[in-house]
């Protein structure tokens, strides 16, 4: 079943007199349960595509549909509601809230959703457990390694039970082992819990594990399919 | 969110502490100002009403009387009876003021000699507060006189010396000699230089047999301006009962300048405190603004995660509110403690007492504060928090998440 659909998506940035075409017309469909990477070199438009899919930015033209509902023309409040209930985010720089513990960070989206304290702590703890982080529940981000922080970030996204988790270069700041561990855990969530993941990445370790790769170059989608076919 | 707001406050602990202390100081200052205003107001009220009564009964239009007789009450006995039935809680003092010349052997001075009767309650306070030497002149004593200390010095007389009074009366001019039996010490130098007290009988014998200039109504249980409102019905009823030939004046009529000053005192304190809150608010604004600026990326993340603009505004406002309320609580605690200490009465240092007495300010002050004034101070603190947070909160709420991700503080 089609979860995400992007039609002829374009995005142009203007800085002073300079116009930059970050996306030049991208068509993409993401189905439920996918574990898909959007790959490409720096400047290819991966993050821009992810931001537009997630409603963090507005396209210059084109359409973004989530669950058959168009989301690129929503108001700020409507967009926030979609992000809160339907989407999960994992950022390259982890972006945990520094004054909250791992458990509180994992429960943060649930708190935004209005879930009561007892339930959100239980779900957050379960989410941390799924990422192997329950022992570190009371630690603050500055007491965790990069890999651990990123796992808490994934737990935060996962705890809210979104339709899809968008991850922007999730392993970019991690060492080999941490990155590998993270990928394994996300893959397990995908296989065991059916969580749909879409990543932007140029990390070959991540590409080994995905079921599908979308290759971007100069703001265009140049290939899509199994990784070995796309990257060949 | 409350825990998050509190922890965010202390990310830049020193900066938040400075703003919090500023709010605490302003709240402390505000409650102390309000209590001082209350102390001054009630102190001046108490001093005035102690001296002239909570109300006075005069003959109508007495201020425009062309001669001594025209200013006298004609039917004092009937008026006393009316007062007893209409305002039974009032302690009534009959007073006769005789303008004239008071002379010692070599020196003289023009003033109004005062003769009055002394109910026990008022007599005790007068003797305790003012009689410095000698004995109290009252009742049937028609040969003794009490003088203010500086008046006695000016006339070059002391205890046991004779002074002479020359005064107009209802039956022509009169003169009499009195022996100085009491010396009075008032804190107000102007009162002291003009203080000459005879018994009522002596004053009536000198100038106007059986006559009175006024009847003073004293309510010993009414000690504050707020309590003064309780006697308004009595006064209104009394005026109705006495008719147009008699004028009943309350303390505001007797001292309009003081009444005007007291009317302005409290609002002035409120305005002054508001100015200080504005200044503290600028400091709070600076703290909240910088804190928001430093966390633009974080707010971008929170918006990305699905928080609406109102939620973001609420977060920033909550931080500001917690900072101001914590400061207010500290300031209030210290302020109320100081007010509790001052509620038992305190005097200013030596030289200040004379200065205050000279300008009619009470020399012993009793700090007090009304609940609405406490709420006002806290309310100002809350308003400070809201207004200080307004700009930064809107800025945070309107962050574009994609741009915020690229922001580096």
Image (cartoon, coloured by chain):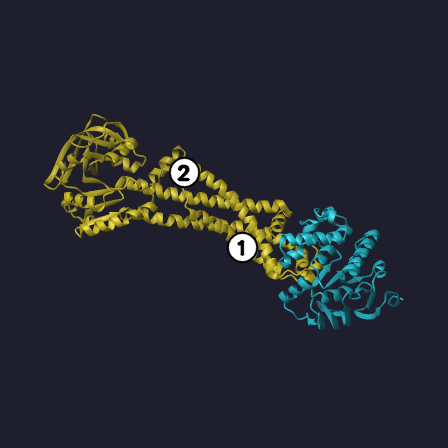
Chain colours: A cyan, B yellow
Can the viewer see residue B174 in this picture?
A: yes
Residue occupying the point 37% across, 42% down: B40
Give SS at disc 1: helix
Q: Is residue B374 toward the left or the right of residue B178 in the image? A: right
Where, by quadrant of the figure, is residue B206 drawn? Answer: top left
The image position of residue B135, as x and y in percent, is 23, 27
The image position of residue B379, as x and y in percent, is 48, 51
The image position of residue B404, as x and y in percent, is 68, 59
Crowdedness of circle 2 by 10 Å Cα count: few (<14), some, many (20+)? some
Residue furthest left as drawn: B171
Which quadrant is home to the N terminus of chain A? Answer: bottom right
In the drawing, what numbered circle is on residue B59?
none
Chain for numbered disc 1: B
Chain for numbered disc 2: B
Residue furthest right as drawn: A232
Q: Pick whichever of labels 2 and 1 is earlier in the sequence.
A: 2
Residue occupying the point 35% across, 49% down: B263
Give SS at disc 2: loop
Residue occupying the point 11% across, 42% down: B170
Q: Is residue B397 toward the left or the right of residue B162 in the image? A: right
Closer to the camera in the image, A196 or B283: A196
Residue furthest top as drawn: B160
Could you give the CA–CA distance between mark 2 and mark 1, rounded to whole angstroms? Answer: 33 Å
Which quadrant is home to the C terminus of chain A? Answer: bottom right
Tag 2 residue? B343
Placement of B104 over or under A74, stated as above or below: above
Q: Is residue A64 toward the left or the right of residue B210 in the image? A: right
Tag 1 residue? B386
Placement of B67 over or under A80, stated as above or below: above
Can the viewer see residue A149 in this picture?
A: no
Placement of A220 over or under B75, stated as above or below: below
Closer to the camera in the image, A158 or B231: A158
């Amino acid at each position: 079943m089609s979860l995400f659909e992007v039609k002829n998506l374009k995005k142009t940035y203007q800085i002073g007199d300079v116009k930059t075409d970050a996306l030049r017309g991208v068509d993409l469909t993401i189905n439920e349960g996918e574990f898909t990477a959007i790959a490409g070199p720096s400047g290819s438009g991966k993050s821009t595509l992810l931001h537009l899919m997630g409603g963090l930015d507005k396209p210059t033209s084109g359409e973004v549909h989530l669950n058959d509902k168009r989301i690129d023309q929503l108001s700020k409040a409507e967009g926030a509601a979609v992000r809160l209930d339907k989407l999960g985010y994992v950022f390259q720089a982890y972006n945990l809230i520094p004054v909250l513990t791992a458990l509180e960070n994992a429960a943060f989206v649930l708190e935004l959703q209005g879930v009561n304290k007892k339930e959100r702590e239980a779900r957050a703890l379960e989410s941390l457990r799924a990422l192997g982080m329950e022992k570190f529940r009371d630690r603050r981000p500055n007491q965790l390694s990069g890999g651990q922080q990123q796992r808490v970030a994934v737990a935060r996204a996962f705890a809210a039970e979104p339709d899809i988790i968008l991850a922007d270069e999730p392993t970019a700041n991690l060492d080999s082992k941490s990155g590998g561990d993270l990928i394994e855990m996300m893959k397990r969530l995908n296989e065991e819990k059916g969580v749909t993941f879409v990543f932007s990445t140029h990390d070959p370790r991540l590409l080994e594990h995905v079921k599908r790769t979308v290759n971007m170059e100069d703001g265009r989608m140049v290939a899509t399919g199994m990784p070995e076919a796309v990257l060949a | 969110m409350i825990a998050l707001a509190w922890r965010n406050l202390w990310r830049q602990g020193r900066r938040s502490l400075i703003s919090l202390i500023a709010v605490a100081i302003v709240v402390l200052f505000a409650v102390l100002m309000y209590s001082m205003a209350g102390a001054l107001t009630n102190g001046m009220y108490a001093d005035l009403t102690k001296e002239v009564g909570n109300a006075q009964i005069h003959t109508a239009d007495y201020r425009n009387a062309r001669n001594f007789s025209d200013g006298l009450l004609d039917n004092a006995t009937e008026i006393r009876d009316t007062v007893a039935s209409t305002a039974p809680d009032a302690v009534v003092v009959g007073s006769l003021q005789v303008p004239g010349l008071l002379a010692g052997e070599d020196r003289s001075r023009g003033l109004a000699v005062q003769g009055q009767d002394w109910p026990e309650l008022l007599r005790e306070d007068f003797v305790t507060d003012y009689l410095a030497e000698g004995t109290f002149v009252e009742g049937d004593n028609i040969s003794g006189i009490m003088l203010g200390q500086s008046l006695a010095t000016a006339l070059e007389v002391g205890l046991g010396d004779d002074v002479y009074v020359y005064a107009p009366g209802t039956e022509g001019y009169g003169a009499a000699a009195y022996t100085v039996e009491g010396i009075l010490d008032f804190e107000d130098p102007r009162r002291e230089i003009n203080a000459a007290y005879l018994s009522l009988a002596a004053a009536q014998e000198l100038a106007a047999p059986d006559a009175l200039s006024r009847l003073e109504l004293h309510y010993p249980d009414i000690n504050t301006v707020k309590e003064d409102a309780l006697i308004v019905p009595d006064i209104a009823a009394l005026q109705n009962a006495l008719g147009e030939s008699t004028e009943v004046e309350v303390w505001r009529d007797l001292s309009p300048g003081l009444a005007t000053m007291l009317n302005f005192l409290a609002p002035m304190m409120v305005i002054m405190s508001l100015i200080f809150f504005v200044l503290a608010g600028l400091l709070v604004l600076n703290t909240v603004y910088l804190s928001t600026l430093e966390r633009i990326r974080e707010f971008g993340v929170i918006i990305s995660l699905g928080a609406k603009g109102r939620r973001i505004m609420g977060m920033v406002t909550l931080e500001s509110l917690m900072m101001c309320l914590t400061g207010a609580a500290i300031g209030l605690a210290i302020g109320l403690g100081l007010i509790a200490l001052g509620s038992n009465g305190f005097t200013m240092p030596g030289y200040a007492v004379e200065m205050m007495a000279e300008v009619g300010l009470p020399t012993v002050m009793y700090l007090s504060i009304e609940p609405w004034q406490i709420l006002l101070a806290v309310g100002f603190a809350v308003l400070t928090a809201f207004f200080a947070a307004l700009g930064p909160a809107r800025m945070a709420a309107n962050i574009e998440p994609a741009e915020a991700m690229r922001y580096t503080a």
